[in-house]
Image: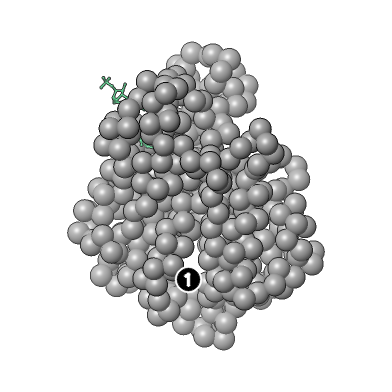
Amino acid sequence: MTGPEGVEIVGVGTAVPDGVVTNTDLEKVMDTSDEWIRQRTGIEQRYRIKADQGESVKHLAKDAVIRALDAANMDAAELDLIVLSTMSSEMTCPPTACRLAAEIGTKNAGAFDLSAACCGFVFGLNTAYGLMQTGQYRNVALIGADTLTNIVEYSTKGRNGAILFGDAAGAVILRKTSDTGKGLIAQAMHSDGARWADLSIPQTKFDLPEGVEFDEWQLGKLYMNGQSVFKFAVGTFPRVIEQTLDRAGMTAGDVDHFICHQSNRRILEAARDRFGLAEEKFHINIDRFANTVAASIPLVLNDLVSARSVKPGQRVMFVGFGGGLTWGTSLWQL
Ligand code: UT7
């Protein structure tokens, strides 16, 4: 699928807020325990913005994209397009990407928010690559950023969301290259909207899933049927990886790194074991960041870049799943 010109990932950057919330901190405000959270999710801590002091997804996205631009040795004015994958937009209008573009100093680059929940980064990569192949965009910033701590309930009644999610942003800079060997090899994007209710943020009482008794606290808060999403993820992860390998005419052995949405350690380990992959190939960092939705994949990528574990010439498969329900992949030749 590589077009007349290739596309390369030339910079990666990430950002987390200062505030750390440990499992022990959560024990103080809800009925849970450090031991339960570690065993059932693999999470040890998460980061949380100070929303009451004006911190928002834009601040994290801005720090991440500035770092990615630095790594790419590129000025913001050179960007043609900014795609901000998030389900935490500050307002429904304007797109947060537009305010971000203004703050970093682009020159009227296209900018929009892409809403695909935990698939945001993967769907964003596929979208950005497709747009770059039109020939109209040479330098694109893709940011995955989310602040779900704003919409989870920090008490026992909302504990599944509170223990699972954290705030972060991760950005990549994509650039056109004359090396046609670099870029997207294969991809997949799917959804099953019939399962919308498994992960949703009801705004009115009419948005609540059937059978859920309405309570005022639920409005504007994350509703998650954890067990249902868990089962869905364990089955879907391997299937979509296999589908993408088939599309590429490859086996798991042909891929150097699998960078998957960090949802829950047990979901990730089930997928890793299904393909018999070594830990060096199938990365997990949920212990340090928790589930950061659209940011989780670039956080892993950044870890690998910092450790110099990911190199030009390698193949990387990005895999996401989440609210919608949605699931998808993006397989790249670096
Ligand atoms: O990002 C993509 C979207 N989201 C996901 O991928 C999330 C997928 N789901 C999950 O990660 C898991 O379902 C959760 C972590 C949310 C919940 O874990 P679980 O193993 O599915 O727990 P459960 O709801 O089946 O509850 C098991 C037990 C219950 O106790 P009993 O009835 O066995 O005595 C719960 O009451 O654990 C109890 N429990 C808790 N205990 C302490 C449930 N949540 C907690 C908690 N702390 N936070």
Look at the image and tell me whether residue 48 can be seen. yes
- What is the x, y in percent for residue 219? 59, 22
Asked if the beta carbon under badge 1 is closer than 8 A to the nearest atom of ligand 1, the reply is: no
Vertical arrangement, residue 299 with respect to residue 204, above or below: below
Vertical arrangement, residue 292 with respect to residue 79, above or below: above
Question: Residue at 70% across / 72% down in the picture?
Answer: 75
- What is the x, y in percent for residue 264? 35, 42
- What is the x, y in percent for residue 287? 36, 46
Question: Residue at 35% across / 61% down in the picture?
Answer: 258
| Residue linked to disc 1 | 184
Kind of residue indicated by mark 1: Leu
Farthest-out residue, bottom: 178
Ligand 1 visible in quadrant: top left
- Residue 52 appears in which quarter of the rendering? top right
Q: Residues within 10 Å of mark 1 (few under 14, many from 20)?
A: many
Question: Residue at 39% across / 55% down in the picture?
Answer: 260
- What is the x, y in percent for residue 321? 43, 47
Vertical arrangement, residue 181 with respect to residue 159, above or below: below
Look at the image and tell me whether residue 206 can be seen. no
The front one of 61 and 242 is: 61
Where, quadrant-wise, is the C terminus in this rendering? bottom left
- Count all numbered tags in the image, as a single digit: 1
Question: Residue at 43% across / 75% down in the picture?
Answer: 333
